[in-house]
Image: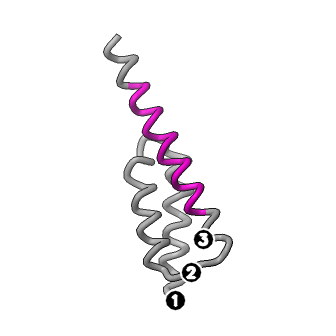
Amino acid sequence: MRLWLFYFGLAACVLGYIFVGLGIVLFPISIFCLMYAGVYNIGFWIMIVGNILGFSMSLFLVVEKIATMLV
């Protein structure tokens, strides 16, 4: 069990929500760290759902920003 990877994944997820533009990079890194950490409790599943939602939000906001620049 690599608990430090779990906490690194948690930090990457939080930073992904703070810096939405970087969420496209930070959320997949966070998911990788969480999967590799080997911690499979309720916190793990909450973080995975949060990462998927955050990645979707980041992708939507970046595409919306690009679309408004083009129009």
For residue 68, above or below residue 26? above
Taking the spot 59% from the left edge, 63% from the top edge, the residue there is: 47
For residue 55, above or below residue 71? below
Query: Is the residue under label 2 in contact with that under label 1 (CB below 8 Å)?
Result: yes
Q: Answer with left or right where residue 31 lies relative to residue 3.
A: left
Q: Quadrant of residue 48?
A: bottom right
Q: Which residue is mark 3?
A: 44
Taking the spot 42% from the left edge, 55% from the top edge, the residue there is: 26
Other-residue count near label 1 (Cα within 10 Å), few / some / many at <14 / 14–19 / ≥20 = few
Query: Is the residue under label 2 in contact with that under label 3 (CB below 8 Å)?
Result: yes
Q: Earlier in the sequence, mark 3 or mark 2?
A: 2
Disc ID at residue 52: none
Q: Answer with left or right where residue 69 lies relative to residue 6.
A: left
Q: Which residues are magenta?
A: 47-65
Disc 3, SS: helix
Q: Is residue 51 magenta?
A: yes
Number of labels in the image equals 3
Badge 3 amino acid: Phe
Disc ID at residue 39: 2
Residue 29 screen position, x and y as percent? 40, 62
Residue 4 screen position, x and y as percent? 51, 80
Q: Main secondary structure of the magenta part?
A: helix
Other-residue count near label 2 (Cα within 10 Å), few / some / many at <14 / 14–19 / ≥20 = some
Farthest-out residue, left: 70
Badge 1 amino acid: Met
Taking the spot 58% from the left edge, 57% from the top edge, the residue there is: 49
Q: Earlier in the sequence, mark 1 or mark 2?
A: 1
Taking the spot 53% from the left edge, 55% from the top edge, the residue there is: 51
Other-residue count near label 3 (Cα within 10 Å), few / some / many at <14 / 14–19 / ≥20 = some
